[in-house]
Image (cartoon, rainbow, N blue to C red):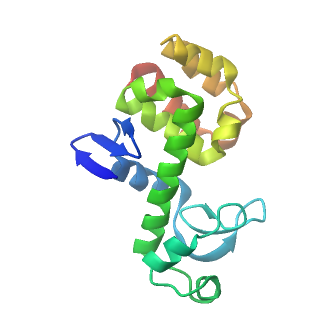
Amino acid sequence: MHLRCGWVTKRDDIVMKYNASHFLDKLIEHEGMVLTVYEDSLGIETIGIGRNLKDRGISPEELEYMDIPNMAIVYTNGISEADSRYLAMNDIKIVENELCQVHPCVKDLDAVRQLILMDMAFNMGVPRLCKFKKMWNAIHENNFDAASIEMMDSRWARQVKSRAKKLSDAMKSGEF
């Protein structure tokens, strides 16, 4: 279910305060959008805005919605920008559900901090994000200064550099 009410978006009984369309635009800025199948930095076949074709693939329902008869067409012709955005919004819903299932406190955070955690989860996956135990402990205690420090004390921060700094600063201040 998709109901838009200002900054609150309800998806699959999870109420998130951030604007999913705004988040999608930020994902495109950070991840890029490639409309043909390519291999990512780990050699995994990917399309669109980071859709992992090995692990997630494209479901028959998604193919039908995009009016693509089969995966062979995706591999041959690629997908449209609208299809890429559609797949990414589906991925966002999946990540929201996974994140809120393992850390229900995410639902209670403000829009900025939800957006930060969604960005991190989309970038590295929820299982890897869950390994930030000290960051999560700080978030559970509403100690966002400490959460910000823990974000920067990670391999992820060394890999994504300025993106991590921007997200860490926003975690601390509650503002982008």
**Residue drawn at (59%, 70%) of the image:** 58
Q: Which residue lies furthest to the right in this view?
A: 43
The answer to whether residue 60 is visible is yes
Residue 129, image quadrant? top right
Between residue 19 and residue 40, name the one nearer to us: 19
Between residue 57 and residue 112, name the one nearer to us: 57
Q: Please say if 11 is above or below 169.
A: below
Q: Which residue lies furthest to the left in this view?
A: 6
**Residue drawn at (43%, 76%) of the image:** 65
**Residue drawn at (72%, 66%) of the image:** 54
Residue 124, image quadrant? top right
Q: Please say if 168 is above or below 45.
A: above
Q: Please say if 165 is above or below 65.
A: above
Residue 64 x/y as whole percent = 48, 79
Residue 85, image quadrant? bottom left
Residue 73 x/y as whole percent = 59, 88
Total tally of numbered discs in the picture: 0
Between residue 143 and residue 161, name the one nearer to us: 143
The answer to whether residue 28 is visible is no
Q: In this view, does 18 lie to the left or right of 88?
A: left
Residue 145 x/y as whole percent = 51, 14
Residue 27 x/y as whole percent = 48, 53
> In which quadrant is the C terminus drawn?
top left
